[in-house]
Amino acid sequence: MLKLDFIGFEPTIDLNKRDEILKKLNTNEAMCDFLEISKTISQEELSKVLELKSEIQRNADLFIVVGIGGSYLGAKAMIDALNHYFKEEGPKIIFAGTSLSSAYLKEVLAEMEDKSVYVNVISKSGNTLEPSIAFELIEKEMKTLFPDYQKRIIVTTDKEHSSLRSHASIEGYRTLEVPTNIGGRYSCLSVVGLLPMAVKGVDIESLLRGAASQEKDLTPSVTYAFWRYNLECRGKEIELVTFYEEKLRSFGDWVVQLLAETQGKNKKGILPVSNFFTANLHSLGQYIQEGK
């Protein structure tokens, strides 16, 4: 059971509301297949991911993952959290399409020179602006550098409704399917996050087993949700998601996305801020203690 200390305050948990929410989570309309590991990835797809992982680790010096938001935040969070600070596992990984920085893209293209490169472009719709621009430039460079560019580009996208899938079919790229009933920000344990994680040395089979062992118990999540709801009703509008470990910086970015993008609608929601101690104790710490 999750325990939070808020002096003089205990949250009210509406059991009828809780049961209503849990019932809704089990419908297809809720896009909540991420709650069941068996629905996030099939054994066939897992085998395909593991085969691709072995090929990329064997042949690539540089692995470029193109995507934004949920297409990369979860994978980057896990890679940063689980890997060594200074020792590289597998080929060097670069995330592209995460912004519209022309300087960054220029340096990505320069980094590709004199290296064996594989690319994984991730977009459920295939129409998101930032990864579309990045992939267009990276794909052009791949065609220039590698006669066998088709086998070096892997497309992760929707099964049917995706312009990127049509492009992959024309070019002959290998593809992975984003599950239909999983939104991008919750797709970390599908093919979206698992291939980049596997390439960087994360034991994804153990990761999936661990996730499956926890999927039946939503009590901590439900308790946390009611804490946030009750606090919002009391006028608490900012939440500091605080970490003490540098390896969790990217995890903080992912948590901020999950909370803000999911609940920041209809003029509702608490503002989540990723906050790193002890460094911020010497800057934000003063404001947290005595600011308004």
Image (spheres, helix red, strand yellow):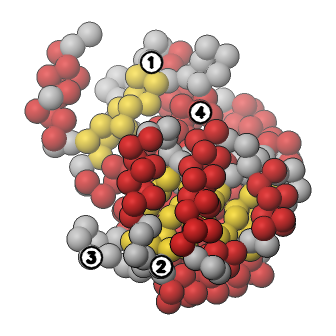
Which circle, 4 or 3, is nearer the viewer?
3
Q: Which residue is mark 4?
A: 261
Measured in 3D between alpha carbons, the distance from the residue under mark 3 to the one under mark 1, in whole angstroms, is: 40 Å
SS category of the residue bearing label 3: loop
Q: In screen coordinates, is 104 left or right of 171?
A: left
Residue 199, numbered circle: none
SS category of the residue bearing label 2: loop
Mark 2 and mark 3 lie on one chain; the one further toward the N terminus is 3
Which circle, 4 or 2, is nearer the viewer?
2
Mark 4 and mark 3 lie on one chain; the one further toward the N terminus is 3
Measured in 3D between alpha carbons, the distance from the residue under mark 4 to the one under mark 2, in whole angstroms, is: 36 Å
Point 51% across, 86% down: residue: 59
- Quick check: marks 4 and 2 in contact, CB under 8 Å? no
Q: Which residue is mark 3?
A: 87
Q: Amino acid at mark 3?
A: Lys
Which circle, 1 or 4, is nearer the viewer?
4
Measured in 3D between alpha carbons, the distance from the residue under mark 1 to the one under mark 2, in whole angstroms, is: 48 Å
Mark 1 and mark 4 lie on one chain; the one further toward the N terminus is 1
Mark 3 and mark 1 lie on one chain; the one further toward the N terminus is 3
Q: Residues within 10 Å of mark 2 (few under 14, many from 20)?
A: some
Seen in the picture, residue 148 relative to 71 is either above or below; the reply is: below
Residue 210 appears anywhere in the view: no
Q: Amino acid at mark 1?
A: Glu
Measured in 3D between alpha carbons, the distance from the residue under mark 1 to the one under mark 4, in whole angstroms, is: 15 Å
Q: Which residue is mark 1?
A: 237
Q: Which residue is mark 2?
A: 116
